[in-house]
Image (cartoon, rainbow, N blue to C red):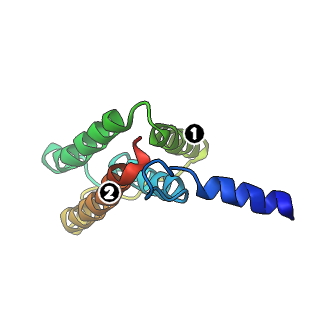
């Protein structure tokens, strides 16, 4: 029991140099990173129209910029884990995709992009709070 308490105390001290880094931030960061990766690289694309697919570019660019910003920090490990999880899931998943470019496609893609943008904001906030140190 004492060993468990000691580990918990040591883990809670992670990021103590900044004073505000929460050790759970890595898990939260990984969750949002995976969600964004899955969103911009869907197994079944909702559209084949280049003008709609281009709408993902700002999200991809923000994700790459954040990846570059956190390079060499503790969050870079979390990002790498999220990338590996994303790649592994794709490697073992076999699906039959529904028809692309339905009447609802553009509205649905817009909602996904808004969601991914919110996830990226949360990831950027974690990085800003000290997770990128």
For residue 116, what is the image quadrant? bottom left
On the image, numbered disc 1 is attached to which residue? 91
Comparing 72 with 14, the one in front is 14
Report which residue position mark 2 lands on: 125
Occupied quadrant, residue 32: bottom left
- Report the disc number at residue 128: none
67 vs 22, left or right, is left
The number of callouts visible is 2
Point out residue 121 in the picture as x, y percentages from the top left corner.
Answer: 28, 58
Residue that appears at 61% across and 43% down: 92
In this rendering, the answer to whether 97 lies above or below 82 is: below
- For the C terminus, the quadrant is top left
Q: Can you see residue 119?
A: yes
Residue placed at 60% from the left, 58% from the top? 12
Residue 44, visible in the rendered structure: no
Q: Nearer the viewer, mark 1 or mark 2?
A: 2
Q: Position of residue 34 (x, y in %)?
A: 46, 51
First-in-chain label (1 vs 2): 1
- The residue drawn where x is 77% and y is 63% is 5
């Amino acid at each position: 029991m004492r060993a468990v308490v000691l580990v918990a105390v040591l883990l809670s001290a992670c990021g103590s140099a900044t004073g505000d880094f929460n050790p759970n931030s890595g898990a939260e960061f990984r969750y949002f990173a995976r969600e964004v990766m899955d969103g911009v690289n869907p197994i079944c694309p909702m559209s084949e129209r280049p003008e709609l697919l281009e709408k993902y570019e700002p999200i991809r660019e923000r994700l790459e910029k954040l990846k570059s910003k956190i390079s060499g920090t503790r969050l870079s490990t979390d990002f790498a884990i999220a990338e590996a999880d994303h790649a592994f899931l794709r490697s073992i998943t076999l699906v039959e995709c529904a028809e692309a470019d339905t009447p609802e496609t553009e509205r649905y893609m817009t909602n996904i992009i808004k969601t991914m943008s919110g996830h990226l904001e949360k990831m950027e906030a974690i990085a800003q709070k000290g997770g990128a140190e």
